[in-house]
Image (cartoon, rainbow, N blue to C red):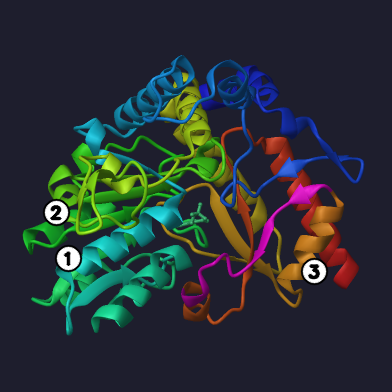
């Protein structure tokens, strides 16, 4: 009941924070259901980025002048806000990267260099986005190691018993997504971490589809690494986070070399800077970092538990409405899901559905969602995906259903 009141009372206010949501497409109000790909940005984030370049822009950690000092301070302040948002123990454990992909590639390279050799194994799951497959594959090829895959059941849920069987003395690391971008499945990462740790194996969590939907506390989770992207949590593109426990980050070699990640450079030898700078080579995307911190503040102001409750309400409503549409099949029926639904309409190709919905102003994603192996698992070459977030409305779900009925009529 409380959620419904929230729906009636606050939603107009929330939507007014996002300038793009009032846009029209083909002269129809935009219904934006592609938040899993990227989210829209609230005005406060746009303002924070503009302020960097109109009020204090200077390169970070380099100059002794006021502009550089102010930018460095804002950048380090952003790091502290990220630390607090994910409850990392130390600021030094928060590395700015270009996004989830950048974060995972960085760990795959550095961890591989330090700890992986011929015959070793890395465990991932059948649900992974290509960003949590390909970097490990590349590392395995370099090091003579191999990938082991946790299977999923017909509802798209991870089979924990099968995971346990995959653990071996050759396992070096487990890397799993917190939630599937393709099916919406929420993965029991806490349980996976406990099991892996009891065998002494570290775990990376791909939080690209997790961090924006509920409270994430990396200390409580006890993950060794956590990765996410700014643009999927209402922040700018080109910025992301790699959280790593200090003990790992101290031991791992840097992924990239360049300015600022060094302590002393001679032609004979280079010593590296302390954490977190050891992993931040070159001019960082400081405007992105500052924009991301503002986005996280916005999420906190909105209330993470309220966001989670509202998105659950949207998920339940949309699932019920879509289930009423007869020739439509939902892929991914996990008991725990983020507000993402994948489906196909019998006899109608996903691109046709997506194209016709687009002409009605409804933005959905079609295709494999950069998760081809999970599409193969279900014997399909793609789906239509709606990925909702807290600024979406019940009315928009109704518009989607009307749009889908129109698609079905056109093809019947
Ligand atoms: N992991 C998951 C689960 C994703 O959904 C995505 C993007 O959709 C990524 C990783 C890659 O994120 P990015 O492209 O922002 O690096």
Give the residue at x 26% y 39%.
276
Out of 286 and 17, give the one closest to the viewer: 286
The x, y position of residue 405, in whole percent, is 81, 58
Q: What whole-number distance in Å separates the C-alpha atoms at marks 2 and 1?
A: 8 Å
Position of residue 318 relative to residue 219, above or below, is below
Q: Can you tell me whether the CB of the residue at mark 2 lies under 8 Å from the nearest atom of ligand 1?
A: no
Q: Relative to 96, is 25 on the left or the right?
A: right
Q: Which of the two discs, 2 and 1, labels the residue nearer the N terminus?
A: 1
Examine the rendered structure and indicate whether residue 29 appears above or below residue 350: above
Q: CA distance from mark 3 to mark 2?
A: 50 Å
Alpha-carbon distance for marks 3 and 1?
48 Å
Numbered badge on residue 251: 2
Residue 152, above or below 66 = below
On the image, the x and y values in percent for residue 273 come to 23, 42
Task: Give me the disc on residue 352.
Answer: 3
Residue at image point 50% right, 58% down: 181
- Read off the residue under disc 1: 114
User: Is the residue under label 1 in contact with that under label 3 (CB below 8 Å)?
Assistant: no
Per the rendered image, the range of residues in magenta is 361-373
Q: In the image, is residue 206 above or below residue 283? A: below
Q: Nearer the viewer, mark 3 or mark 1?
A: 1
Earlier-in-chain disc, 3 versus 1: 1
At x 81%, y 35%, the residue is 23
Q: Residues within 10 Å of mark 2 (few under 14, many from 20)?
A: few
Q: Is residue 370 highlighted in magenta?
A: yes
- In this rendered view, identify the residue nearer to me: 300 or 143: 143
For label 1, the crowd category at 10 Å Cα-Cα, with few meaning under 14, some 14 to 19 and many 20 or more, is few
Query: On the image, which quarter does residue 327 sit in?
Result: bottom right
Q: Are marks 2 and 1 in contact (CB under 8 Å)?
A: yes
Q: Position of residue 357 (x, y in %)?
A: 80, 56
Q: Quadrant of the C terminus?
A: bottom right
């Amino acid at each position: 009941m409380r959620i419904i009141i929230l729906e009636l009372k606050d939603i107009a206010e929330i939507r007014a924070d996002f300038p793009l949501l009032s846009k029209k497409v083909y002269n129809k109000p935009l219904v934006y259901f592609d938040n899993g790909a990227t989210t829209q940005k609230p005005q406060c984030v746009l303002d924070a980025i503009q302020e960097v370049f109109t009020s204090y822009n200077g390169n970070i950690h380099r100059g002794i002048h006021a502009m550089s000092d102010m930018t460095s301070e804002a950048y380090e302040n952003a790091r502290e806000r990220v630390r607090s948002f994910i409850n990392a123990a130390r600021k030094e454990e928060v590395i700015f990267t270009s996004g989830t992909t950048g974060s995972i590639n960085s760990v795959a390279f550095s961890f591989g260099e330090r700890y992986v050799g011929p015959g070793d194994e890395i465990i991932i799951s059948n649900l992974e986005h290509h960003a949590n497959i390909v970097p490990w594959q590349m590392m395995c090829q370099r090091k003579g190691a191999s990938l082991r895959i946790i299977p999923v059941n017909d509802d798209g849920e991870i089979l924990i018993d099968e995971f346990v069987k995959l653990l071996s003395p050759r396992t070096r690391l487990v890397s799993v997504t917190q939630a599937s971008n393709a099916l919406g499945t929420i993965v029991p990462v806490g349980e996976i971490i406990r099991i892996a740790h009891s065998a002494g194996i570290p775990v990376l969590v791909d939080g690209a589809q997790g961090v924006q939907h509920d409270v994430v506390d990396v200390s409580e989770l006890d993950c060794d690494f956590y990765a996410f992207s700014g643009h999927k949590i209402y922040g700018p593109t080109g910025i992301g986070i790699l959280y790593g426990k200090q003990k790992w980050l101290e031991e791992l070699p840097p992924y990239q070399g360049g300015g600022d990640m060094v302590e002393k450079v001679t032609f004979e030898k280079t010593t590296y800077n302390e954490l977190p700078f050891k992993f931040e080579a070159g001019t960082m995307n400081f405007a992105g970092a500052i924009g991301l911190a503002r986005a996280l503040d916005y999420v906190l102001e909105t209330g993470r538990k309220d966001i989670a409750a509202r998105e659950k309400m949207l998920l339940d409503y949309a699932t019920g409405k879509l289930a009423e549409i007869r020739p439509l099949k939902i892929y991914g029926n996990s008991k725990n899901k983020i507000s993402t639904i994948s489906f196909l309409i019998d006899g109608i190709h996903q691109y046709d559905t997506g194209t016709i919905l687009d002409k009605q102003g409804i933005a959905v994603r079609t295709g494999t969602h950069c998760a081809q192996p999970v599409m193969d698992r279900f014997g399909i070459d793609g789906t239509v995906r709606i990925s909702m977030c807290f600024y979406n409305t019940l009315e928009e779900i109704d518009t989607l259903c009307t749009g889908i009925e129109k698609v079905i009529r056109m093809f019947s």
